Image (cartoon, helix red, strand yellow):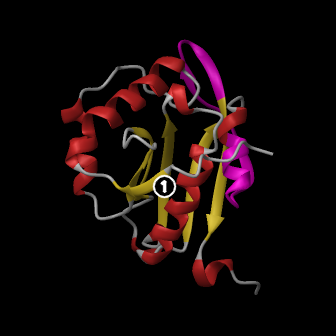
Amino acid sequence: MPARAPDALSVRAASADDLHAITAIYNEGIADRVATFETRLRESHDVADWLGDPLPFLVATDEAGGVVGFARVASYSDRCVYTGVGEHVVYVARAARGRGVGHRLLEALAAASEEAGLYKLTSRVFTDNAASRAAHLAAGFEEVGVQRRHGKLDGEWKDCVLVERLLGEAAEPG
């Protein structure tokens, strides 16, 4: 069972004041080579456009108000049939990993996404990223398939597991 997030952890909408911390956390994810195929470190202006997306973009803050993780949703596709599907990411600062921050962000992201009218969240997680897979499962996501050799990272093929969580009416038994 994943570690629970500390009670003092709070989740709120991301703001421009958070960009430096979000960028630093994203760059840790890039450097650690466990969460993204991206290899070029980013600067705050590279992620600033994420704030303009109308879909949920959340940060988790610790008891001192410092940003310790973020999660966001982007459109899955521009095809109208997929209007209610969001593709999400979740990143947790190295110093805050193993404390349930990812799980807490994913739960809040699912609630905010349902409120925004989405019926499904989906993403790809490296098959060897046990922490992310555990956080997703704990937050009600299901692993629905594997994309073999989905891309190369540092010259090595990486497989990705597809995760999804149905929301609202789509999640009801039918």
1 and 137: which is toward the camera: 1
Q: Residue at x 52, y 26 (%)?
A: 95
Q: Residue at x 67, y 46 (%)?
A: 135
Q: Which residue is mark 1?
A: 87
Rendered image quadrant of residue 110: bottom right
Asked if residue 165 is positioned above or below residue 25 in the image, the reply reads below
Q: Could you tell whether 138 is left or right of 154 in the image?
A: right
Q: Could you tell whether 63 is left or right of 97 in the image?
A: left
88 and 5: which is toward the camera: 5
Rendered image quadrant of residue 67: top left
Rendered image quadrant of residue 54: bottom left
Q: Quadrant of the N terminus?
A: top right
29 and 21: which is toward the camera: 21
The amino acid sitting under disc 1 is: Glu
**Is 9 contained in the magenta span?**
no
Numbered range of the magenta stretch:
133-158
Where is residue 72 shown, x and y percent of the image?
42, 52
